[in-house]
Image: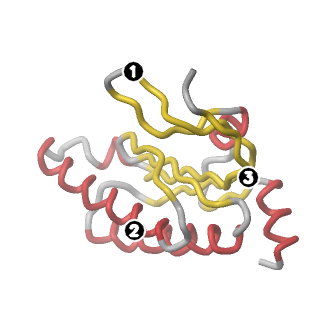
Amino acid sequence: MPDVTEQQLIMASVDIAGFAKATRCIGDVELFELLEAYYQLVGDGVASARGRVIKFMGDGALVTFPAEAPANAVGALRALRREVEAWLAEHPIGEWVAVRAHLGCVACGELGTADDRRYDIIGHAVVELFRMTYAGFELSAALQEALDTAGG
């Protein structure tokens, strides 16, 4: 049985709107290099608030933050959105950045095959995150409540 724990986490989805259309005419190697720069930007942006990139898939990122610091997490996500949109102005691989953020309990641990295990999060809260509105900057009611309670 894998080592798995349950944790309350702030999780967020960061996604570039219009990515598929904007990158249709970009060569694979150039696109790879642009995504490498974007991934670094996302990683650096969340690290300032003790965030962690769980995974990237194309232009989408799933990130987490400690639940006890909602103001830090939301502040880092707002700053990250501004930074990525400024970066997009110079590297036109999309139109704007969608950020959805939620607070919930998830199962955490190494997941995968015997030869390729990676840290991941699984649970209903992750599904709830991805069911949120895909427009601009969205906080779930649970995260907004935690933010209000913490005075953020």
Work out whether residue 59 or residue 52 is closer to the camera in this orientation and state it. 52
Question: Which residue is the site of mark 2?
Answer: 44
Q: Where is residue 103 shown, x and y percent of the image?
A: 73, 52
The three-letter code of the residue at mark 3 reads Leu
Determine the CA span between mark 1 and mark 3: 28 Å
Work out whether residue 86 or residue 58 is closer to the camera in this orientation and state it. 58
Are there few (<14), some (14-19), or many (20+) residues within 10 Å of tag 1? few
Q: Where is residue 143 shown, x and y percent of the image?
A: 77, 59
Marks 1 and 2 in Cβ contact (< 8 Å): no
Whichever of labels 1 and 3 marks the residue nearer the N terminus, that label is 3
- Would you place residue 135 above or below residue 40 in this image? above
The three-letter code of the residue at mark 2 reads Asp
The three-letter code of the residue at mark 1 reads Thr
Dot label at residue 84: none
Dot label at residue 113: 1
Dot label at residue 103: 3
Determine the CA span between mark 1 and mark 2: 28 Å
The residue under the point 75% across, 47% down is: 104
**Rendered image quadrant of residue 90:** bottom left
The residue under the point 43% across, 25% down is: 112
- Would you place residue 139 above or below residue 56 in this image? below
The residue under the point 82% across, 64% down is: 146
Whichever of labels 2 and 3 marks the residue nearer the N terminus, that label is 2
Q: Where is residue 72 shown, x and y percent of the image?
A: 64, 74
Determine the CA span between mark 2 and mark 3: 21 Å
Secondary structure at numbered mark 1 = strand
| Residue sitting farthest toward the bottom | 151
Work out whether residue 22 or residue 85 is closer to the camera in this orientation and state it. 85
Marks 1 and 3 in Cβ contact (< 8 Å): no
Are there few (<14), some (14-19), or many (20+) residues within 10 Å of tag 2? some
The residue under the point 70% across, 40% down is: 6
Q: Where is residue 140 shown, x and y percent of the image?
A: 76, 53
